[in-house]
Amino acid sequence: MLANSASVRILIKGGKVVNDDCTHEADVYIENGIIQQVGRELMIPGGAKVIDATGKLVIPGGIDTSTHFHQTFMNATCVDDFYHGTKAALVGGTTMIIGHVLPDKETSLVDAYEKCRSLADPKVCCDYALHVGITWWAPKVKAEMETLVREKGVNSFQMFMTYKDLYMLRDSELYQVLHACKDIGAIARVHAENGELVAEGAKEALDLGITGPEGIEISRPEELEAEATHRVITIANRTHCPIYLVNVSSISAGDVIAAAKMQGKVVLAETTTAHATLTGLHYYHQDWSHAAAYVTVPPLRLDTNTSTYLMSLLAK
């Protein structure tokens, strides 16, 4: 009786509920933070707080699967820590985020995970989880992957085919990591760009005196993304491991993904808000600070059809 009297009950009434498969008029009853009923003329306990949602959309809380709060990368630190980042997320209707743990080479995955947890736990304002990066490979890395899955609840690992000499894995290492992911039932997330050729492209751009934001687009053409996308799908197919491609940015890479799906390969992919709404034309803006604000990896693409194409592809 005491437990029931302490329950927090909310009835969202008269709104239009938006699900993944349909939109319909319905009421939503929530008890202690958990949705208990969705429908019309609900029979619910008394004492519920009623929220009038007439004329409004009722949408499930969003999950941002790729955040970088309190993260340092190439001498730059994300301006948002876990408190400010998750607080902003909630304001926008995102009720869960997934961050990244990126261990330095030759360091412990478990130690890096625990350090990130110690930073996040006291500050987060919403639910969160962590992808753990596989930035180097050795038998003990596989053992720690198993520990993270079995004992810490981690279910996804992030790999990079770019960032040479920092996070990039060779094909043979990627092959072993995907095997390990399949064996332990973890999600294999991969950032696909040809890291060797990206590094060469960066050198060539610098030799030509190109040091501005446009260099990111010049040194990372979409064919390098498409090639790496095809390569990692091939590696994943050889290991029988489903693959999740992140930061898909180009029509060329999208075509590779679409072809793989048509062949029955288990390939999932995501893009970013930037790639889904913007173009690389900003890199050539006369105001340097404006152009620099649009730098992403992979870069935004010059083809103005890219955004529409990616949204159509990834919605299927």
Image (cartoon, grey):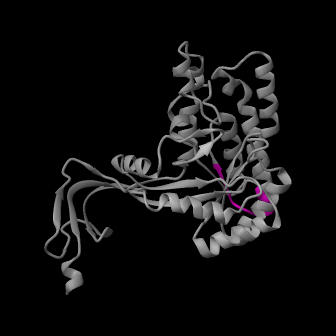
**Is 222 placed above or below 127 here?**
above
Task: Please report the residue visible at 71 percent of the width from the left and 63 percent of the height from the top.
Answer: 108
- Does 242 lie within the magenta span? yes
Q: Which residues are magenta?
A: 236-245
Residue at screen point 77% across, 33% down:
198
Across and down, in percent, residue 91 comes to 34, 47
Q: At which x and y percent is residue 18? A: 35, 54
Image location (x, y in percent) of residue 129: 52, 61
Question: In the picture provided, is 184 more to the left or to the right than 1?
Answer: right
Q: Residue furthest bottom?
A: 1
Can you name the residue that lies furthest to the left here? 46
The one nearer the camera, 200 or 268, is 200
Side (left or right) of 67 relative to 127:
right
Whole-percent x and y of residue 315?
53, 47
Residue 315 sits above or below residue 11 on the image: above
Residue 35: image quadrant is: bottom left
In which quadrant is the N terminus drawn?
A: bottom left
Residue drawn at 57 percent across, 24 percent down: 292
Q: Quadrant of residue 58?
A: bottom left
Viewer-proximal residue among 178 and 138:
138
* Residue 291 lies in the magenta stretch: no
In this view, the residue in front, 194 or 252, is 194
Which residue does the image show at 55% across and 28% down from the upper left?
A: 294
